[in-house]
Amino acid sequence: MGREALAEAMIPVIGRLYRENNVVTSIHGRSLINKSTMNILKAHRFARRMSKEELRLEETAPLLEALTKLDLGAAAIDIARLTEKYRAEGDGASLDEFLRAELAEVVGKRGGDDRTSTDVVLYGFGRIGRLLARLLIEKAGGGHGLRLRAIVVRKGAENDLTKRASLLRRDSVHGSFNGTITIDEENNTITANGNLIQGTDSALYGTTNLGGASVSAWPRSRRRVFHVSSEPSGTENDVTVICPAPLRPIGTPLPL
């Protein structure tokens, strides 16, 4: 099988590890999540700068397949470093035996993650807000860690949501969004790579519903990041409100 075919075959394996096991794979720190065939090939070429030996897809592709059979819990795995260590310290062990020993702490834990999830509301959806949204969506994984749940904007025209989704899809500097985006105008939501994001024009005084958790106290300071408590189902959780730019005084129209 050629290099391009191997890289293409790796894409669904990387995605499955990410979605089902909360495993983030990378090559010398470069994430492989939501990457194209060409980007995976470039990441393998980049490995030459970090080590003297070439990172071959004929080695990394079987390693990824072997990882899918270990029923892993949440982990960040650098397949370049893991491959290099297997070459140097494998001592005749099979790939499966080596991986089970190296990843013993997460083997058999099936997506288990000790982290708690935190709902995130983006207060503003200008260019910085959209780039931040891309990062949050990219790292959503199995729902642990930070989860983008809503965006707060000053509503414009009737097709305002469609325009904002279009801007999220395409950026003149950072290129196209990696994945799919759908719009539900009736419910004012955007679904990006399976992540449901509620849009609201509640601005400084409104209430946003996050699937049972409502945020009714919006920020009134110039701090960029702070917490708003909410009480879904009788329990108190934290909703992190992130302001991509400092807020203006109360009553000042938002420059969105």
Image (cartoon, rainbow, N blue to C red):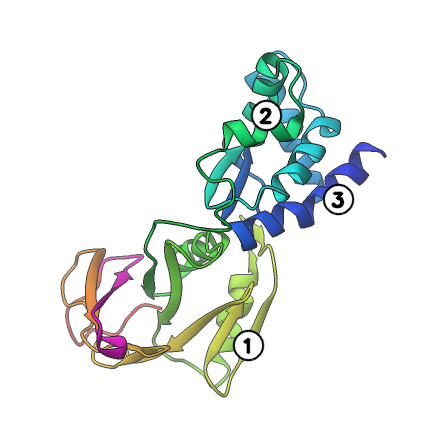
Q: Residue at coordinates 36% horizontally, 56% vertically from top-left?
A: 146
Magenta segment, which residues?
Answer: 231-246
Front disc: 3 or 1: 3
Q: Residue at coordinates 35% horizontally, 73% vertically from top-left?
A: 153
How much space separates mark 3 and mark 2, taking CA atoms? Answer: 23 Å
Left or right: 192 as drawn, with respect to 8: left
Amino acid type for the residue under numbered disc 2: Phe
Q: Are marks 3 and 2 in contact (CB under 8 Å)?
A: no
Q: Which image quadrant is residue 242 in?
A: bottom left
Amino acid type for the residue under numbered disc 3: Ala
Q: Which residue is the extreme one toward the right?
A: 1
**Mark 3 or mark 1, earlier in chain:** 3
The kind of secondary structure element at disc 3 is: helix
Percent coordinates x, y for residue 235 in the rendering: 22, 72
Q: Which mark is residue 102?
A: none
The kind of secondary structure element at disc 1 is: strand
Q: Residue at coordinates 45% horizontally, 81% vertically from top-left?
A: 188
Percent coordinates x, y for residue 145 in the rendering: 37, 53
In the picture of the structure, the residue carrying the numbered disc 2 is: 98
Q: Residues within 10 Å of mark 3 (few under 14, many from 20)?
A: few
Percent coordinates x, y for residue 193 in the rendering: 56, 63
Left or right: 74 as drawn, with respect to 120: right
**Mark 3 or mark 2, earlier in chain:** 3
Q: Residues within 10 Å of mark 2 (few under 14, many from 20)?
A: some
Magenta stretch contains residue 55: no
**Mark 2 or mark 1, earlier in chain:** 2
Amino acid type for the residue under numbered disc 1: Ile
How much space separates mark 2 and mark 1, taking CA atoms? Answer: 46 Å
In the picture of the structure, the residue carrying the numbered disc 1 is: 183
In the picture of the structure, the residue carrying the numbered disc 3 is: 9
Which image quarter is the C terminus in?
bottom left
Relative height, residue 193 to residue 29 (above, below): below
